[in-house]
Image (cartoon, grey):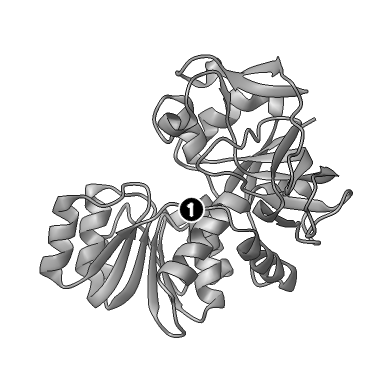
Amino acid sequence: MRAISQKEFGGPEVLQLVEVDRPEPLPTEVLVRVHAAGVNPVDAKTRAGGGIAGVLGELPFILGWDVSGVVEAVGHGVHTLKVGDEVYGMPWFPRAASAYAEYVTAPSRHFARKPANLDHIQAAALPLAGLTAYQILTALADVQKDQRVLIHAAAGGVGHLAVQFAKALGAHVVGTASAGKHEWLRELGADEVIDYTTTAVEDATGDIDVVVDLIGSETTLGQSIKVLKPGGLLVAVPSGTSPELLESAKQAGVRVSSYLVEPDGHALGEIAELVESGAVRVEVEQVFPWTEVADAHRAQESGRTKGKLVLEVN
């Protein structure tokens, strides 16, 4: 099969189309023919030698975790899926899923049936970003009706889904984004939107129960602690926690946690139900032929993506 591989760390130009052996499913695994693969910030960071490059082991390796495609074969013991099922998932993370390829294999329960109202391009934009937002808001923060949730970088891949999930949970949603994205975020359900380029967050809102910080800068982390109510929770996604952050949170009487997404076919099924009901939609800003993966990574690294970028695997 064909795949996008890299033999060295570096810029987007290190990504090359190669021929590799097609994987075969082991017991409890499925073989999925990939129709589309999402592009995430962790992809670009890992390609350059950061991110989770250390988890993937020795080069060469194949990037990508977001998958949407069709089951082509099933291993012994698979009972949840069958050949011909349209599925989507984020298999193996943080180990290699090798989604930038024509085929992937993974445990069947790392996948769920694709939302019926989405094509493969749209579905491939959902798994990693969707699971990150959904797991944080439900499993970690346990967001309840009428709680106030602040989402930094609300217009990004994870952010725009977090806005919608928080709204579906009954929360009052506050998001930060540049002014040009405010109307769109309100359409998604944001109750308040703050232009971080002109307004200090702590001057515009407060009494927050949960902050989902998808930026992780010293500025946003500091702002988050200031706007949280006593006992509130800050989830520091890209930066994680540090002794200094933990101490600042302790002094302010708030909680802080890091978070790393994990494969979760059950949650993907719940997300699919929300999408099919119309409560959640996914924004795909741009689709790239997978042979133009370097351009996709350059767009991802611009830091100005509205929603998600997707590779069409052909």
Callout 1 environment at 10 Å: few (<14), some (14 to 19), or many (20+)?
A: some
Answer above or below: position of 1 versus 268.
above
Q: Secondary structure at mark 1?
A: loop
Q: Which residue is mark 1?
A: 261
Screen quadrant of the C terminus: top right
At 13% across and 59% down in the image, what residue appears? 247
Left or right of residue 287: residue 72: right
Answer above or below: position of 143 versus 180.
below
Judge whether residue 67 can be spotted in this image.
yes
> Residue extending furthest left?
251
How many circles with numbers are drawn on the protein? Answer: 1
At 43% across and 85% down in the image, what residue appears? 146
Left or right of residue 278: residue 231: left
Answer above or below: position of 121 versus 272.
above
57 or 27, which lies in front?
27
Where's residue 112, x and y in %? 72, 58
